Amino acid sequence: MGEKEEKSPDGVRYYRLSEIEQQNSFKATWIIIHNKVYDVTKFLEEHPGGEEVLREQAGGNATESFEDVGHSTDAREMASGMLIGELHPDDRHKMDNAVDTLVTTVREETSWWTNWLIPALAAAFVTLLYRIYTNQSE
């Protein structure tokens, strides 16, 4: 309790990741989206996607899930009403590392042959079949 409350230059309260992680119950449900902290406790029952979706993200980074769903402008405006602060800058690297790790394990680099060689061979094969067919027709 002896911690001094820190605020951003524009007066927004900073929360430490450890503090946010503890807010994962029906009494208090916080999520992080783009380093901003939202208290979604009162919104659990109203969430169109169901409260389970928010409960799964409780106390953690919901950025990827939030963006994957493609929330509307109205949803984003509604979320702004639940904004209570920001993730402390000293803890942001912890969140970035988690997202980067997930993205790098999910992202699959394609090689040149899948992008160029296979379509080129398919086009050559179709062209060859077309020429054989048109020569037989004459």
Image (spheres, rainbow, N blue to C red):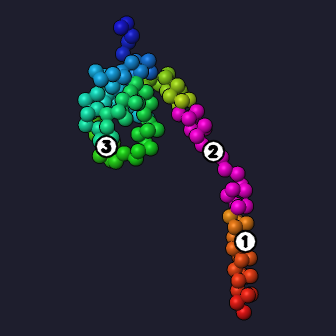
- Residue 62 sits above or below residue 72 on the image: above
Residue identified by numbered label 1: 125
Label tally: 3
Q: Amino acid at mark 2?
A: Glu
Which marked residue is nearer to the observer: mark 3 or mark 2?
Answer: 2
Q: Pointers 3 and 1 in contact (CB under 8 A)? A: no
Residue in view at x 41 percent, y 30 percent: 57
Give residue 23's position: percent from left, percent from top. Answer: 36, 21
Tell me the residue at 29%/38% (across/down): 47
- Residue 56 lies in the magenta-colored region: no
Residue at 60 percent across and 38 percent down: it is 104
Q: Quadrant of the N terminus?
A: top left
Crowd class of label 2 (few under 14; some 14 to 19; many from 20; radius 10 Å)? few
Image coordinates of residue 48 in percent, x first then y, are 29, 41
Residue 75: which disc?
3
Query: Which residue ends up furthest to the front in the rendered image?
Result: 136
Q: CA distance from mark 3 to mark 1?
A: 50 Å
Q: Residue at x 40, y 24 (%)?
A: 59
Check disc 2 and report the residue beneath it.
Answer: 108
Look at the image and give the residue range highlighted in magenta: 99-118
Neighbours of disc 1 within 10 Å: few (<14), some (14-19), many (20+): few
Left or right of 88 in this view: 104? right
Indicate the amino acid at tag 1: Phe
- In this image, 59 relative to 128: left or right? left
Quadrant of residue 105 within the rendered picture: top right
Picture quarter with the C terminus? bottom right
Pick the front one: 14 or 112:
112
Q: Secondary structure at mark 3?
A: helix
